[in-house]
Image (tube, rainbow, N blue to C red):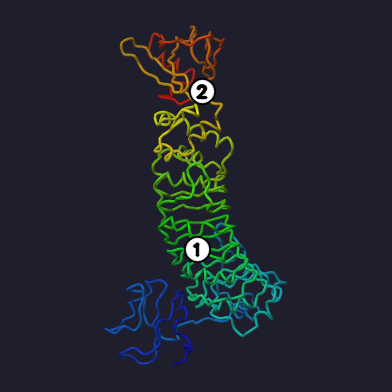
């Protein structure tokens, strides 16, 4: 093979300037002299064709314009791991400053700082003292001489190998097997080959707790095969890969606490059932996975699912969830405390953003953080009470009742509002719900109003301010306090009350000289803005 092209060039990763690609062909091209490399580029815009030239197909590309030919002397096939470390940390008689500049790497929501060439301390210039190493974008392509890493960098625990020229998982094993205390490994943005048979085993990662495989083109089947070598793994990042189908992780990933599947097109939310029995999973990131619904069919409404028993944090933002029923389902998760759900179609069904937040809070009983904002106790109480007000009339019309023996809401209502009976009959059972209906009587010019109670329906009304009335007292907030005989209404909206032995049997109109005065009278006791109002006693 011509000079500049290694004997194992086929299938290897290379860089040419700032572009990355994979060698798909090595050999001659008709009508030319010398050896060419046929490259499938990561960025299709770098290419010219699909691997064919003048009618001859030399290699295949996934994109019709993703391939081109370059001469071997234009390709950079990379360096070994230790050479990259020495270059990065200035231990090769020269400091190579052309490599990457980033000193931090983001794992999901966590930022891990790696010691880079800009911040390396003087005492870390000896390789055997380095603990955190970042060789991102340093063209690492292979492990180097056997056991050289273990002899030179014995104390490494955190390694960033992202965006290099690593072609296969075997190269990662060759590096990691020489770092016995390795806890954190980031090999993202390396498009590599992974094992495809069940005979694959590796003991190179006995202490690995955090692994990032974002943008590596790994499939879920390959994840499960490799996971046999990750006995204590706690966090796994698999964003932007070829994961479209999930399988049950039998006897692997049993220590996993965080799983990031964002930017993989799972499409079907039912696939989540296949990973629902991961016994220690606490955080699941499903951002932009294309899912349109979430269901836990093993549990009825009001009951908790056996799926995801320890899941505390869930991210489903940027998906296609259009129905509130999926939010109802999340209340079945026994441990859920934090949710991210922005940018889903169901959020467009409510124009008022505050009401939208209240509905989500009210529907998921144990939620403590919503879209990265803490839910305070007062906010939860307000959300649940407002939820009762908004849908109280629907509940009664559907067969709901304050008496548990008579409470028989329809299946349709329970499917739409599974928490509603709990809020009415359990959590706030000491409260009484009332409806206020206001209307204008055209024949008399009077403003009338009516309270309707689920348990004791009746009508009542008032006279003008300063005149005796017989009805329920009101405070300025518009909430009903108690019933009695009001002898005086103060401008603050409070009522002076005395007990009354009976309630009025027929509506009594509120008399005032003008409609404006009538409205002012109602407004003074906090009622005018509620037409109709669903209040609480």
Residue 471, percent from left and from top: 48, 13
Identity of the residue furthest to the left in this view: 55
Rendered residue at 59%/37% (across/down): 377
Pointer 1: residues within 10 angstroms few (<14), some, or many (20+)?
some
The vertical placement of 18 against 6, above or below, is above
Residue 462, percent from left and from top: 45, 11
Residue 309, percent from left and from top: 56, 52
Image check: 185 left or right of 502?
right
Q: Secondary structure at mark 1?
A: loop
Q: Earlier in the sequence, mark 2 or mark 1?
A: 1
Q: Which mark is residue 479?
A: 2
Q: Secondary structure at mark 2?
A: loop
The vertical placement of 74 against 194, above or below, is below
Q: Which mark is residue 320?
A: none
Rendered residue at 64%/77% (across/down): 90
Pointer 2: residues within 10 angstroms few (<14), some, or many (20+)?
many
Inter-mark Cα distance, 2 to 1: 53 Å
The quadrant of the image that shows the N terminus is: bottom left
The vertical placement of 337 against 467, above or below, is below
Image check: 135 left or right of 65?
right
Residue labelled with disc 1:
248
Q: Quadrant of residue 106?
A: bottom right
Image check: 499 left or right of 396?
right
| Closer to the camera in the image, 465 or 308 | 308
């Amino acid at each position: 093979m011509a000079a500049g092209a290694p004997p194992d060039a086929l299938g290897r990763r290379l860089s040419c300037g700032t572009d990355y690609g994979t060698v798909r062909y090595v050999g001659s091209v008709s009508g030319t002299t010398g050896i060419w490399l046929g490259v499938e580029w990561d960025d299709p815009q770098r290419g010219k064709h699909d691997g064919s030239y003048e009618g001859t197909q030399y290699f295949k590309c996934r994109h019709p314009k993703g391939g081109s030919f370059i001469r071997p002397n234009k390709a950079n096939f990379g360096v070994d791991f230790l050479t990259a470390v020495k270059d990065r940390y200035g231990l090769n008689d020269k400091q190579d400053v052309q490599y990457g500049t980033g000193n931090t790497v983001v794992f999901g929501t966590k930022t891990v700082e790696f010691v880079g060439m800009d911040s390396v301390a003087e005492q870390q210039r000896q390789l055997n003292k380095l603990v955190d190493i970042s060789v991102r974008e340093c063209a690492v392509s292979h492990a180097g001489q056997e056991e050289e890493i273990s002899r030179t960098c014995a104390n490494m625990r955190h390694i960033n190998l992202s965006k290099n020229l690593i072609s296969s998982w075997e190269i990662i094993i060759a590096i990691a097997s020489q770092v016995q205390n390795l806890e954190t490994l980031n090999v993202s943005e390396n498009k590599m080959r992974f094992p495809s048979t069940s005979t694959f085993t590796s003991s190179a990662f006995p202490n690995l707790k955090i692994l990032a495989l974002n943008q590596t083109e790994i499939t879920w089947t390959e994840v499960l095969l490799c996971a046999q070598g990750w006995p204590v793994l706690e966090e796994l990042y698999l964003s932007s890969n070829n994961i479209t189908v999930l399988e049950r992780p039998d006897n692997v990933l049993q220590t996993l606490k965080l799983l990031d599947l964002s930017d993989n097109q799972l499409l079907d939310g039912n696939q989540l059932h296949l990973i629902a029995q991961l016994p220690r999973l606490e955080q699941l990131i499903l951002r932009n996975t294309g899912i349109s619904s979430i269901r836990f069919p093993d549990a009825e409404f009001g009951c908790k699912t056996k799926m995801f028993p320890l899941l505390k944090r869930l991210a489903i933002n940027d998906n296609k969830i259009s129905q509130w029923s999926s939010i109802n389902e999340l209340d079945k998760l026994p441990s859920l405390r934090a949710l991210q759900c922005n940018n889903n179609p169901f959020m467009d069904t409510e124009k008022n953003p505050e009401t939208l937040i209240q509905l989500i809070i009210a529907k998921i009983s144990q939620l403590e953080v919503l879209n990265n904002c803490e839910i305070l106790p007062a906010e939860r109480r307000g959300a649940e009470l407002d939820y009762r007000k908004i849908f109280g009339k629907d509940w009664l019309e559907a067969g709901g009742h304050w008496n548990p023996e008579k409470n028989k809401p329809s299946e349709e209502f329970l499917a739409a509002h599974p928490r509603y009976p709990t809020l009415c009959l359990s959590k706030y059972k000491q409260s009484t719900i009332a409806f206020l209906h206001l209307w204008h009587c055209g024949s008399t010019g009077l403003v009338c109003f009516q309270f309707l109670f689920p348990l004791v329906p009746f009508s009542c009304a008032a006279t003008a301010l300063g005149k005796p009335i017989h009805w329920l007292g009101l405070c300025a907030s518009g909430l009903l306090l108690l019933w009695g005989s009001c002898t005086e209404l103060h401008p603050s909206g409070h009522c002076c009350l005395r007990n009354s032995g009976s309630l009025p049997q027929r509506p009594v109109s509120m008399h005032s000289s003008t409609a404006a005065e009538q409205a002012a009278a109602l407004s003074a006791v906090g009622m005018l803005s509620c037409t109709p109002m669903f209040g609480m006693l």
